Image (cartoon, rainbow, N blue to C red):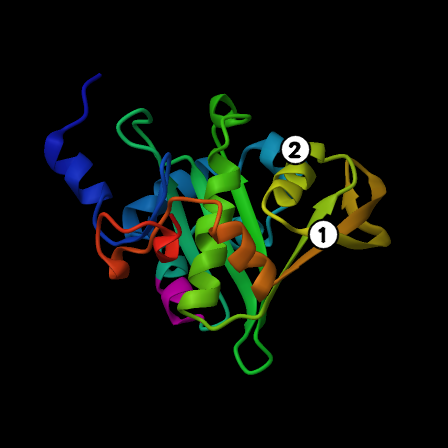
């Protein structure tokens, strides 16, 4: 089924950061339809266990007021991952949450909701883009992430983005009626900058045609 051109243009509004394969845009009210589907996906629940989706499903009971609550929440930035024209629907979410501006740190969550998009590098690039956003726009000096011990794909994506495993939270996660270790990763501002020098991505505020910090 062909996409309606106007709908395609609408999806490209609110672009915050653009890479070579994906771009990140702001959350819109109509994205709640996607959240409703993703919140019911048992694979996402097992691999990510997203508090964001759980809150939408269980706390807000999928009420539209969730969108306004996200806009008003100064402790998180929620961006939608797109890969047009190859993908007709959003690929998932990239989120910075528990943002502490004074201390300069936040937590990262990247979630690919289409299994066909896994192992294509989309999650890796989305993680880079929102990390650059965190440094450039929010002034973060440190970003942290946690993954279930069995989620090797997410752990490897973090490592590819320069994150270092800093520890293990023993039996801190709970899935499938069982407690699991959580792997703790972190990256510092200067390490994010080192990764940026290897990439050709830019923020729209920098203007099209520029590479990441003109690192050529």
Secondary structure type for disc 2: helix
First of labels 2, 1 by sequence position: 2
Outermost residue toward the right? 170
Q: Which residue is mark 2?
A: 153
Between label 2 and label 1, give the one nearer the viewer: 1
Which residue is pictured at 39% across the width and 71% down the height? Answer: 72
Give coordinates of residue 106: x percent, y percent. 58, 66
Q: Is residue 99 above or below residue 150?
A: below
Secondary structure type for disc 1: strand
Which residue is pictured at 22% across the width and 56% down the height? Answer: 207
Which quadrant holds the N terminus?
A: top left
Find residue 98 and name its label. none
Give coordinates of residue 47: x percent, y percent. 66, 36
Outermost residue toward the front? 216
Q: Which residue is mark 1?
A: 164
Label 1, residues with CA under 10 Å away: few <14, some 14-19, many ≥20: some
Give coordinates of residue 213: x percent, y percent. 37, 58
What predominant SS class does the magenta segment belong to? helix
Let me know if residue 190 is in the magenta part.
no
Magenta region, residue range: 68-73
Q: Quadrant of residue 78?
A: bottom left
């Amino acid at each position: 089924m062909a996409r309606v051109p106007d709908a395609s243009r609408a999806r490209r509004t609110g672009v915050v950061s653009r890479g070579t394969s994906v771009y990140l845009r702001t959350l819109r009210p109509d994205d709640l339809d996607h959240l409703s589907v993703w919140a019911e996906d048992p694979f996402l629940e097992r691999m990510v266990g997203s508090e964001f989706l759980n809150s939408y499903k269980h706390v807000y009971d999928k009420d539209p007021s969730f969108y306004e609550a996200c806009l008003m929440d100064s402790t998180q930035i929620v961006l939608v991952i797109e890969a047009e024209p190859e993908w007709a629907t959003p690929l998932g979410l990239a989120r910075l949450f528990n943002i502490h501006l004074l201390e300069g740190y936040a937590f990262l969550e990247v979630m690919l909701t289409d299994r066909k998009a896994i192992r294509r590098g989309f999650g890796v690039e989305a993680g880079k883009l929102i990390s650059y956003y965190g440094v450039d726009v929010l002034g973060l000096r440190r970003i942290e992430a946690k993954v279930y011990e069995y989620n090797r794909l997410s752990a490897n994506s973090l490592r590819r983005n320069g994150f270092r495993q800093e520890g293990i939270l023993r039996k801190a996660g709970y899935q499938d009626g069982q407690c699991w270790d959580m792997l703790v990763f972190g990256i510092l501002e200067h390490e994010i900058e080192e990764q940026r020098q290897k990439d050709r991505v830019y923020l729209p505020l920098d203007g099209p045609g520029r590479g990441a910090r003109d690192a050529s």
